[in-house]
Amino acid sequence: MFSLLQRGVFKKIAIGLAGFLLFFVLFGLFAAPALIKKAVIKEISHYLQREVAIEAIQVNPLRLSLTFKGFTVWERGSSEVLFSFQELFLNLKIVSLFKGALVAKEATLQTPFFHLIRHQDESYNIDDLLPSPDDKDAPPFLFSLNNIRVIDGKMVFQDTPKGARHLIENIQIDLPFISNMDYYVDTFVTPSFGALINGTQYTLRGRTKPFETSLQTDFDITFKDLNLTTYLAYLPWKIKGRIPSAFLDADAKLTFSQGQKKDQRLLLHGQFLLKNAALDDQEKRPVLRLPYVAVNLASSDIM
């Protein structure tokens, strides 16, 4: 008699759990996407102060994944597109709910597009989106994005004062992680970067140490005779004077590492050489000449 009662209780519990699971799956597949889409558009539009559109959002409650399709942000008061992507896939971890953070085991962004404009007054079309100095005391938003892939990205930089247009296309990026919190992930993609910049192909690839318990991967950063004067005009601060000459060499390494204690670290170390640097005053009179300056950077956690 008691065993029959036990079987009846267990049967009711099993039916209840199955019903809850079915409701959870159906809600995630059919009801949640519409609710999430409405909330996301409202919040992002309010934060960016720009019109935002999303074609569709897909939710897989069993896999804990989110897929955003057809995302577009327009320039303020304009029909020009500021940022868009065809698809963003996030394979979330349940720990996101308990930590109040965004933790994704996998993040894939397909065909992102970004349009950056430098106006005649040397302001940028995204100046209002940059963090304010008053926000420095605000608590950081915790995140851990792992196994990141950017596929077929494109960026257009329109430099109005110089009458120039810079095009970066066919952007392919693989990153093991970007994180400001400790979270352990089992698998790693090998870091790499590739892009066609103003018609010239650039490719950088990393390497993994498969037998290391730290799951360490290294990414070499090497270049010679980078003409810094080409990019000084794009600095967010003004230089009191003129820099007619400055070249930079780099032989550095970016290391993605994590131990068994879930401590993720993004380390940068190497040698940087500043060559033939010259600083003149507004009247083009020499102020400073530096033929050669070497900086050896110790291993530093940049996150």
Image (cartoon, rainbow, N blue to C red):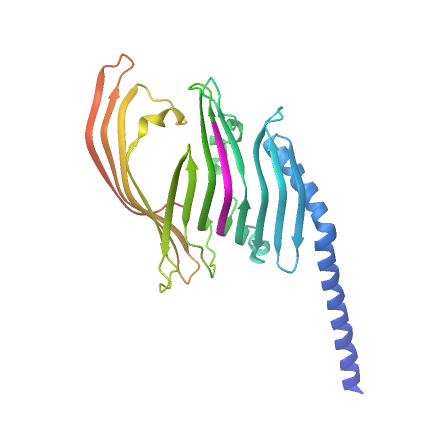
Q: Name the residue at 41% across, 54% down.
A: 190
Residue 59: image location, x then y, percent: 66, 52
Name of the residue lying farthest toward the bottom: 1
Q: In this picture, is 124 found above or below 27? A: above
Q: Is residue 59 left or right of residue 169?
A: right
Name of the residue lying farthest toward the left: 291
Question: Where is the N terminus found, in terms of image quarters?
Answer: bottom right
Name of the residue lying farthest toward the front: 199
Q: Nearer the viewer, residue 51 or 200?
A: 200
Write the start and end of the magenta stretch as one range.
146-157
Q: In this picture, is 5 found above or below 279? A: below
Q: Is residue 257 left or right of residue 249?
A: right
Say if residue 131 shows up in the picture. Answer: no
Q: Nearer the viewer, residue 189 or 111?
A: 111
Examine the image and state in which quarter residue 290 appears: top left
Q: Is residue 181 left or right of residue 89?
A: left
Q: Main secondary structure of the magenta part?
A: strand
Residue 259: image location, x then y, percent: 39, 60
Examine the image and state in which quarter residue 237 appears: top left
Q: Name the residue at 24% across, 27% down.
A: 277
Q: Name the residue at 41% across, 63% down.
A: 260
Q: Name the residue at 77% across, 70% down.
A: 15
Say if residue 225 shows up in the picture. Answer: yes
Residue 175: image location, x then y, percent: 44, 49
Residue 282: image location, x then y, percent: 29, 14
Q: Is residue 195 left or right of residue 20?
A: left
